[in-house]
Image: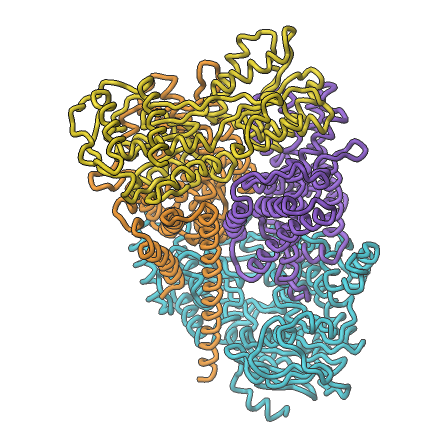
Amino acid sequence: MRAKRLMAALLAALCVMGLTACSGAANADNASGDEAASADGEVQEAVGEVVEGMIATKEVTVNPYTDELKIGFIPSNATEANGTAWGEGIREELSYWPNITYNIFDGEMNADKQSQLVYDLISQDYDGIILQAYNSSILAAAVEDAEAAGIPVVTINLGADTAYAGHVAMTDYEAGYAIGNKISEALGEEGGNVVVIQATPGATRGEELESGFQASMAEHPEITILDEQTGEWNMEKANTVMQDFLTSYGDEIDAVFCHNDQMAEGAGVACQNLGYNDIIIWGANGESKALEYIEQGIITGTVYTNCYDQGATAARLLMMYLGSNIDTSTFTQTPVIKMPPITVDSSNVANIPQEDRW
Amino acid sequence: MRQETLRRIISFALLVILLVIFSATSDTFLTANNIMNLLRECSVVGTLAIGVTMCIITGGNDLSCGALLGLVSMVIANLYHYTAFSLELILAVGLLTALLGGLLNGICISVLKIPDFVATLSTGMIFTGLIYLFAIRNESGLITSETIRNETIASWGGSFGNGLYYSTVVFFVVAIIAQVYLKHTKSGTYLYAMGANRKSAEYSGISFVKTKITAFMISAGTAFIGALLLLGRNRAVETATGTGLEFQAISATVIGGCAFSGGRGDAIGTVIGVLFMQVLRNGILKYNFSTQTQSVISGVVIVVMLIFDAYYNEYMQKKTTKASAVAREKKAVN
Amino acid sequence: MAETLLEMKNIEKIFAHVHALDHVNFEICKGEVVSLLGENGAGKSTLIKILTGVYPKDGGEIFFEGKQVEIDNKHDAEKLGIAVIFQELSLIPTLSVTQNIMLGKEMSTLGMIHYSAEKKKIAELIQRYDFPLEADAIVETLSVAQRQMVEILKALSADAKLIIMDEPTASLSRKESEVLYKIINQLRDQGVSIIYISHRLEEVFNLADRIAILRDGKNVGLVDREEIVPGDVVKMMIGKRLSEATASRNLTLSDKEVVLEVKNLTHLGYYENVSFQVHAGEVLVLTGLVGSGRTEVLRSIFGADPYDSGQVIYRGEVLKKNRIKHTVSKGFGLIPEDRRTQGFAPLLSVTRNVAVTNYDALAHMGFVNRAKEDELGEAVVGMVDLRPANPNVAVGNLSGGNQQKVVLGKWLTRDLNVILIDEPTVGIDIGAKDEIYDFIEKMTMQGIAVLMVSSDIAEVLRVAHRIIVMKEGRVIREFHDGAVTQEQILLAQSGLKEQAKEEAQYE
Amino acid sequence: MNNQKTKKLYEFRKVAILIAICLVFTILLPGVFLTWSNIRSILYSVSLTGIMICGATFAVLIGGIDRTVSGNAAVAGACCCSLLLSGDGSMGSTVLAILAGLGCGILSGLFHGLVLSRFDIPAFLMTLATNQVLYGIVQYITQNKLINVMNAKAFNTIGSARILGIPVPVYILLICFLVSYVVLNHTVYGRNLYSVGGNREASKLSGINCRKVICIAYMISGFMGALSGLILSSMNQQASATQATGYENDVLAAIVVGGISLRGGSGTLQGAMFGAFLIGIISNGLRLLGIDAIYHDLVKGVIIIAAIAFDMYSSYSMSGMKKRGPFRRKASSAE
């Protein structure tokens, strides 16, 4: 079981690396991982073979199966559904390794706090860090320093503006683009008007979603963006913003795009309360509550990501690095595993099984 | 022994107790790396708290310092991104921004006579608004953030060879200067006088307007230094930079012995307060506590410390009044 | 005598149509100690406040060192070299002695204070006058006496030519006072002039070169040191108006029931073994100098402070310790010592302040009957003759006398059995004082037992039925019947040598 | 000038500021701002903070500060929602869950009251720390997941139902305001509250049990916080571990903008509501104008400073202190 999972992780990661990772780096002929031959020697060897000649290697010093290892997860907010789901996905995956200590450190929606946490984990000699950055520029320095200290960093959802071990992306740009297309599809030839309830200004994720959405809108000139206001990621604030939109534009509004599900739910409740039942409302995330709202017809759709799976993937990728001789600090580009953006609406929401809802 | 000194020793003892507990129960707390890192974490909040100390000593408060720090960083990042100015010029503009912000605070409070709390709350909003205005935009005009790739700025976040970070040294230097300023300069003495007894301070020819503006200018100055330290560490600015730092700074200041009523506290106390908060924050991470347990424990520790401090103060006060009364009694008998 | 330092001519001050100062003249020479005597409200404080620029004068001229001057604020006064040592101290509690003295005139280069030089200077100053002070002690850790010394030092270090001392010994012990006398003599020798205001006549007689006596805002006498006859001075102060009524008083021991009994009350460090009884309709006055433990006894009886041993008995029932609500429910009331910090909430209206003690009658099921409350407000305004006669005015904006009337009104409106009054007329003008005495008298007519603390002798004689003198936490003397004069009380309070003789005469 | 008249003018001045701002928005937004539906939406958006303000005002009036309003709201919401989930959905269990939520708030208030009335602790710092503890408790209850109560129909009615076209939370705000107003202005407790806030020592010497008054103030604050937390949960049909974060700042801002002194004893509930509506109306107007969110803070800050400065200035000039200026010594008529 263990081996199978690790193998799967390796394969997934290496495929991606083959596509996106840098080539080149020097010192390829340095010692490979033969010293660290372990219970699963076969796998190790396979890694060695694939890696050699492609990227810089280092001496393998730890054995992920037997050594006491410490892994920390720093979500931007540990107390929200997303953060919890990722955390649980990682925990689930790491629970197969009883020798690993895993802990979650709350970033409190504060990139600077996250940066401090990264430094703290560096000073505590953690072996690996999984990070869901709140802001990619702010975290760049800390991630660089972690990598320099020999700690591989794998990011989830939002990475850092630098090169490091790996990124398991939620593909916000694509999600925004897909939602734009879905909305234009629903509105048809004659087009219509759309309002956007945005993230807190300056949040990287909101920026990505917005860019993708605008790219789609550029292709659909029949749709007009009436207004954009921030709902601060927050359900009741989005509710208020939606009410104000309805006051200003009333029936003119055909569709709403919200930068996350909570805000979509807030907008949905506002529309329902004010009797606007035919407005198309899209969120992004795919939290369980949003899926239920889709089932009940309060909101139209969302972009679903399996956060458990995403967390698990990140964990697998990290475990692969820990046992391998790959020197992630020499990467000049970050390998990316993309989680597929699954657009969910009433037609396919039933396909998402309960155990994958978070 | 003077009561102030005794209090100082008590608060220092509380810090030591915390340090001892963490060192004894965690094997990753008392390591050179962690201590250096902890001291580095102190530097930004600490520097800011030193400025807030000045405002609180005058009987005021500065809720805008976090936002001002963010604004200064943003102005620097903006100029770095959009202009070809030399770094010196950019820093000069940053400093100017900070001082203008401090001046605005000072004027609102001393000339417009708006209570400190409301004034700095509103100016904080204004600074936040300005942060957005100065934010860096991407091609489609959306606010984004960008890592600053500049050797000089990056080097500010560096350390001496032995792991001691520059920012820590800057913090302690600022604290020492502030302590000297408060205790050994005219202007520093006036801050105390204004905070403890405004009327008699004014009778002594000390200007309320000048004193307030000085305090807030200093606070702005420390916000500028804090911004540089933060830039050195993160090498990037986002719109939320600085948010919430004011509460950390104010908490540390009050724990360090400043009273909102004014006239009390000093830079050393604030340093102890900052260390207390950061040791707590850092130490609590060393255990396998869940996030909820972490927040509960750190909250409870602060509450217990506050109660202890208040109880101790009360006790000391009772003791001194009683002692003087007993002394009087004795004199009467003789 | 040396040349004239200050001359005030025909000073006039009118407060609300009352001549607080009516063409008052005052003169002081260099190196002279002039004592300003007069009852509370005679105009001493007003004169001083005009001299220091707190109040503008309504008429007259001031000459300082021969030149006519206008003193508009304290700064002007300071520039001239006039310094005041107020009863309410104006030091910065959290700064050191040196910092306080040097505040605003620090020795510094480029803003950096030469603290050691300053300290040395202050230490020298302290040594010169032999004050029990340390130059870098923090003021809030000092005793009241020490703080006063700091104030004096502050005046001295500003090269004051004229120092005004307003009741400087009020809260000093005997030994501390003697230090002060020494200081005053030293200052005089150095050519500093001192205006000395005090109620302690014996010290005035010992210190002053001349005594200027004011009464009802008018000059009534100027006595040189050699001509001082204590009895005459006191007579001048009291004047004819009050001489018959209060210069002496016939005390009578009441035969009505004992309402309040205090038995061996002791609060270690504050007072010891205090016992007395108060009868219905009687005014028992606890007198003594500040710090003699009078106020503390009063507060303990009311339940505001604890006590270590002893009993407070109300009509045979032992009252619970430290339970204000309990004592209030028995019909007790307290007019506290410092009305500003203990008497009222300055931002609230008269009605609200007065009603605080009356909600048992004004409210039904916790709801305030506003009509009744307003009625009460109006009633109190009428009852205590409040000016302005507006129950909606914030108490903080009223004059001292009217504030005190409000505090009085809080309890007057209740069915009282015992009222405890602590220094009711400090800082209050004459008119309002009389009214307050009338209220006290009215209360006694209603059978209320009054226990009052006062250090104002005229006041004691005006209202007392019985007098207890306290000193250093003990009851040292009781006047319970027969005639008693101001002199006797004064002397008893101060614990002067004549005491023994007097006692023999009156007991 | 007659003091009562002056006081009325003060109150009117605040209303005048609001009217002026509304007038500007009405002119800028013809047919949009001054419509029934927009007024309704302003009321709805202010209702949450409004209810919290009704409570927190008590804490500020006794000279404290309550930053735990948000923590209380979160604990109450989480506690209530988790009970709703485990309940059988009957009316009885819903009521029980609501009562449990309110109980959490009252308990938290009691704790704060007991500690803050006994010890001389800066309430600002104390409640900052306890708020953190409360959120820790919320995280325990929710396990950091959304507690989804969209199926608790009866409970969700509170947030979504309307009576006469007006959302229920607005009625709750109105009730809270009226009750608080009556308590503050027409009950013995209210009188004692102002008295304790205005001068604790004098109140003690008048026979008021100051500790009790302070405890009750914090309990009311806790209760109102919890109530708004329940409404928030009902509006959102969920409880989350981050619920209501940041509301304490909005509440405090509204209170100080409304002219309640942080020293206690002075200020009115109407004033605090003025603060809430000032901020609420500005936000609403700016959104309706389609102004980019990045300017909102800036404009709000400037308007608040201008409004307060105007308020201060006119209060000085009206109280006849114009010439002397606010901080010159006032020659009192007493000797």
Q: In the picture, which quadrant includes the N terminus of chain A?
A: top left
The residue that appears at 49% across and 53% down in the rendered structure is B197
Residue B229, given in percent of the width and then of the height, sits at: 34, 35
Residue D112, given in percent of the width and then of the height, sits at: 57, 55
The residue that appears at 50% across and 40% down in the rendered structure is A79
Vertically, is A158 above or below A107? above
Which chain: orange?
B
Query: In this rendering, would C132 be left or right of D285?
Result: left
Residue D307, given in percent of the width and then of the height, sits at: 63, 33
Answer with the quarter of the image where residue A301 lies. top right
Query: In this rendering, would D188 be left or right of A90?
Result: right
The residue that appears at 55% across and 79% down in the rendered structure is C267
Give the colour in which the image draws chain A. Answer: yellow
Answer with the quarter of the image where residue D269 lies. top right
Which chain: cyan?
C
Residue C472, given in percent of the width and then of the height, sits at: 52, 80
